[in-house]
Image: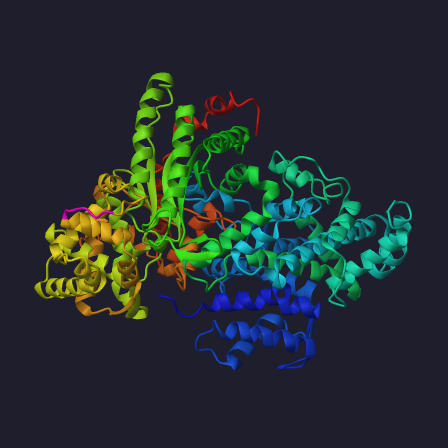
């Protein structure tokens, strides 16, 4: 499905390169220089070569000449030959942004319509934190930054979004905006630095290793403090060169403080930090010494974590000078704006100041790029890496993520309801503690004047994983060769059952938790765990919640609390389109979702089979997944769900028969049994999803004696036999043929009709799907095939209710209002009339609102207080 990048994506790469690339950091780039038209000076040429290497992998079909023209058109747009980075960034800000008083909007013109301007800013926001661009704009125009975000919605779109909107698909761990995470991180570095082990969970950290990353973060924190003191001094006393400040002012200041090794050592340590920042020489200074220096500069480390987002900003080391206040940007943005203003004016010729400031900003921008998913890294495995990176850096705000989600998602719209997702702990009192903490954060949230308090809800999701590790050895979760369990997915199911039991016990201890704890989900690597191990987990918790809902009907009748609902990540990641459709339908087929529930992403429902086949005509797929696809298709013919083309049916039966013999034949023949025919295989697939049969087997501790019933025995073989597993994992090469594409079109129509009949809403996540699904542009988002434009409904294309969501605000550099705006501008770029595009957006907003799982009572502070009033005031 992936194609070459858009023109705007390539421009964004060029624009961000001087501020957020490793090469710019290594070269201490402070300006872009060309000696004559088309010829760059040495340092700029090295930066350009690195950029070419990066773009070459993305710019499919573009020659080096085309890329060099693109580069020079961005870097030297005004015809300059020597451009300081402060001017490069302010020019970038002027081109993209528009000052609108208390907010920053998009600049547009006849040559750059608003929808195109939005696309350019969207791609830039993946590569560069927009608060830095806002800081440059404020520095250039001479105003105090009042915000850290760019407002994308138009006045009319804002009116549409002034009606209640529901955020129904948000992972709370990524709900902290980068500027807030950075403020917490920069203060937290004075205490215990993030664990190297956690930093490595998301793949290789920046700068080559976890330890080097920590060093650079500490160096950035120290540099920020020194730069802050310098800018403060210039504003109050007058300008001196940065080198003079370091030699005289800093030495005089250090003479008034105590340092165990003397002031000379302290001064030398400062210069070692700056030398390492500039790459002059590697330093042997240890992390504890760096942390000690930083503590010395900013003062005592608080003994407790912040209890509110306001306190996070109040603890920022720059807050004593740039005090946080409503109506103002965070201290970081205001500091950057003052520093850039200095570089544009009195400090324009101070090369050391420029180099020091841009080196600091590059460490910050490289950290941003590490956390925000990079375009071109499609697939849930890449997303998981990016998501895992956040946890190690957000420790100072870990207990404030729900409050942060409320703040982030309230921007530029009327947030009527917020559902946030997280994985449950395997200890019941931790689950209880967490849900109460969410209620406490929600209770203290203050909406904007004139807005009602939002309804709030928590969705607990079971996390899929591909591998388990025992004594350093890794195996697939599907591998049955486990001494303790001896069956497929045994370790994973056992762990998730412990979490399910913890949730059950927490609910039995305090049924009132159901006011906030509203649904179950399963997330992460979609293809790593099949549907059948989920069924017993969901069945048990929904049964328990129904019982406790009955109790609450008597104890808290005014709350009107129904049992737990479900929403399943499905149809987002698939090797073949039929696999995505099968996994979506299995959630209905085996009772995971029902009336009024939801499907997360559901890309396979709206992706045109011809579009999919154009990039996936030949695909490798594990043999057992191919067999399940075929059995699912045959079951649809048997039930009359799909029209049966005789040729296609015979082809599918023959393929299923062949694969079944390849996978199960040797094991069955060795045991003296008979291979099941295709119809029996279809029944065996159904029984695999039957919790009663799994329970009879003792799953996940499966008995070693096979059952006598041939079909049940087949399920037992699937669960336990190593040879069946090995043969099932063998890749088979599959060609998408015309008769399959016709089947896929019919299957999509039928499945969309099923979702419509069951009032199931598909949670669309535009930015998430743009990156994870490798969509070239938002205009090609499958959601536009699911929900029809006004007056364009077609009889053979059943509509599906869709909601709009952000998924992961930090990972995708977005928020809920932005996601509505991205879809709105995509419709405009598709030449849809603004009135029709607004009507489409409003319908999606209404679908999200009506499909929410939150309860009206959860918007009442008094009701929320019931959840934690007996918790003894603990956090």
Judging depth in this view, the residue of 324 and 706 nearest the camera is: 706
Where does residue 552 sit, x and y in percent of width and height? 36, 21
Q: Relative to residue 227, is residue 154 drawn left or right?
A: left
Q: Relative to residue 619, is residue 356 drawn left or right?
A: right
Residue at the spot 79% in from the left edge and 47% down from the top edge: 297
Where does residue 302 sit, x and y in percent of width and height? 71, 37
Instruction: Magenta stretch: give its range.
Output: 705-709
Which secondary structure type mostly characterizes the magenta part of the structure?
loop
Residue at the spot 29% in from the left edge and 39% down from the top edge: 536
On screen, residue 527 above or below 542: below
Where does residue 93 sit, x and y in percent of width and height? 61, 59
On screen, residue 658 above or below 463: below
Where does residue 635 sit, x and y in percent of width and height? 15, 53
Judging depth in this view, the residue of 674 and 528 nearest the camera is: 674
Residue at the spot 23% in from the left edge and 39% down from the top edge: 692
Q: Is residue 153 magenta?
A: no
Q: On the image, which quarter does residue 240 sit in?
A: bottom right
Q: On the image, which quarter does residue 672 sit in?
A: bottom left
């Amino acid at each position: 499905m992936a194609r070459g990048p858009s023109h705007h994506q390539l421009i964004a790469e060029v624009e961000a390169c001087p501020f957020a690339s490793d090469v710019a950091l290594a070269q201490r780039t402070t300006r872009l220089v060309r000696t004559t038209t088309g010829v760059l000076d040495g340092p700029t040429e090295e930066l350009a070569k690195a950029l070419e290497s990066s773009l070459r992998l993305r710019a499919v079909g573009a020659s080096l000449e085309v890329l060099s023209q693109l580069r020079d058109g961005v870097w030297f747009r005004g015809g300059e030959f020597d451009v300081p980075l402060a001017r490069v960034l302010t020019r970038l800000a002027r081109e993209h942004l528009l000052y609108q008083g208390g907010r920053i909007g998009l600049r547009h013109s006849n040559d750059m319509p608003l929808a195109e301007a939005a696309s350019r800013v969207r791609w830039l926001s993946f590569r560069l934190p927009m608060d830095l661009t806002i800081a440059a704009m404020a520095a250039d125009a001479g105003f105090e930054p009042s915000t850290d975000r760019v407002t994308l919605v138009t006045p009319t779109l804002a009116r549409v979004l002034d009606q209640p909107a529901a955020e129904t698909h948000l992972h709370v761990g990524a709900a902290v905006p980068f500027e807030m995470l950075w403020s917490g991180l920069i203060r937290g570095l004075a205490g215990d630095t993030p664990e190297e082990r956690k930093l490595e969970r998301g793949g290789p950290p920046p700068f080559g290793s976890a330890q080097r990353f920590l060093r650079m973060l500490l160096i950035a924190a120290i540099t920020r403090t020194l730069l802050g003191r310098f800018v403060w001094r210039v504003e109050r006393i007058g300008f001196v060169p940065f080198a003079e400040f370091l030699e005289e002012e800093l030495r005089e200041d250090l003479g008034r403080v105590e340092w165990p090794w003397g002031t000379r050592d302290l001064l030398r340590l400062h210069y070692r930090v700056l030398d390492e920042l500039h790459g002059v020489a590697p330093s042997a200074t240890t992390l504890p010494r760096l942390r000690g220096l930083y503590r010395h500069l900013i003062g005592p480390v608080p003994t407790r974590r912040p209890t509110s987002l306001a306190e996070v900003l109040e603890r920022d080391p720059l807050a004593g000078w740039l005090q946080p206040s409503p109506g103002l940007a965070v201290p970081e943005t205001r500091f950057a704006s003052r520093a850039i203003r200095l570089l544009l004016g009195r400090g324009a010729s101070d090369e050391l100041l420029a180099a020091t400031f841009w080196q600091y900003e590059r460490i910050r921008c490289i950290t941003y790029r590490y956390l925000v998913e990079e375009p071109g890294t499609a697939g849930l495995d890449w997303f998981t890496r990016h998501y895992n990176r956040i946890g190690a850096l957000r420790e100072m705000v870990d207990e404030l993520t729900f409050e942060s989600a409320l703040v982030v998602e309230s921007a530029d719209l009327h947030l009527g309801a917020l559902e946030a997702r997280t994985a449950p702990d395997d200890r019941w009192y931790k689950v209880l503690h967490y849900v109460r903490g969410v209620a406490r954060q929600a209770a203290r949230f203050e909406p904007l004047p004139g807005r009602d308090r939002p309804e709030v809800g928590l969705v607990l999701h079971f996390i899929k994983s591909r591998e388990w590790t025992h004594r350093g050895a890794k195996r697939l979760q599907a591998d049955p060769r486990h001494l303790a369990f001896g069956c497929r997915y045994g370790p994973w199911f056992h762990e998730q059952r412990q979490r399910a039991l913890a949730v059950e016990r927490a609910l039995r201890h305090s049924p009132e938790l159901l006011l906030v704890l509203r649904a179950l989900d399963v997330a992460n690597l979609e293809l790593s765990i099949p549907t059948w191990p989920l069924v017993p987990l969901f069945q048990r918790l929904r049964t328990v919640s129904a019982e406790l809902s009955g109790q609450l009907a008597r104890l808290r009748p005014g709350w009107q609390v129904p049992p737990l609902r479900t929403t399943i990540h499905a149809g987002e990641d698939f090797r073949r389109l039929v696999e995505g459709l099968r996994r979506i339908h299995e959630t209905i087929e085996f009772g995971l979702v029902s009336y009024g529930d939801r499907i997360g992403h559901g890309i396979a429902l709206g992706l045109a089979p011809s579009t999919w086949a154009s990039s996936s005509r030949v695909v490798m797929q594990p043999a057992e997944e191919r067999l399940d696809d075929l059995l699912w298709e045959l079951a649809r013919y048997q039930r009359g769900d799909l029209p049966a083309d005789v040729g296609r049916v015979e082809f599918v039966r023959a393929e299923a028969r062949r694969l079944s013999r390849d996978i199960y034949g040797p094991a069955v023949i060795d045991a003296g049994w008979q291979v099941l025919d295709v119809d029996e295989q279809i029944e065996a697939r159904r029984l695999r999803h039957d919790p009663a049969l799994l329970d009879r087997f003792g799953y996940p501790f499966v008995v070693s004696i096979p059952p006598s019933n041939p079909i049940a025995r087949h399920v037992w073989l699937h669960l336990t036999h190593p040879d069946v597993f090995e043969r099932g994992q063998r890749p088979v090469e599959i060609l998408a043929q015309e008769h399959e594409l016709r089947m896929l079109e019919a299957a999509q129509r039928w499945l969309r009709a099923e979702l419509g009949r069951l009032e199931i809403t598909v949670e669309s996540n535009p930015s998430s799907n743009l990156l994870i699904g490798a969509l070239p542009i938002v205009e090609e988002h499958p959601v536009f095939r699911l929900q029809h434009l006004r007056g364009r409904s077609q009889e053979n294309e059943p509509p599906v209710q869709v909601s709009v969501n952000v998924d992961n605000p930090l990972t995708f550099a977005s928020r809920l209002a932005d996601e509505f705006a991205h879809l709105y501008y995509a419709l405009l770029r598709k030449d849809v009339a603004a009135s029709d595009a607004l009507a489409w957006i409003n319908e999606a907003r209404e679908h999200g609102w009506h499909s929410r799982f939150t309860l009206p009572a959860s918007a009442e502070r008094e009701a929320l207080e019931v959840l934690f009033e007996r918790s003894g005031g603990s956090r």
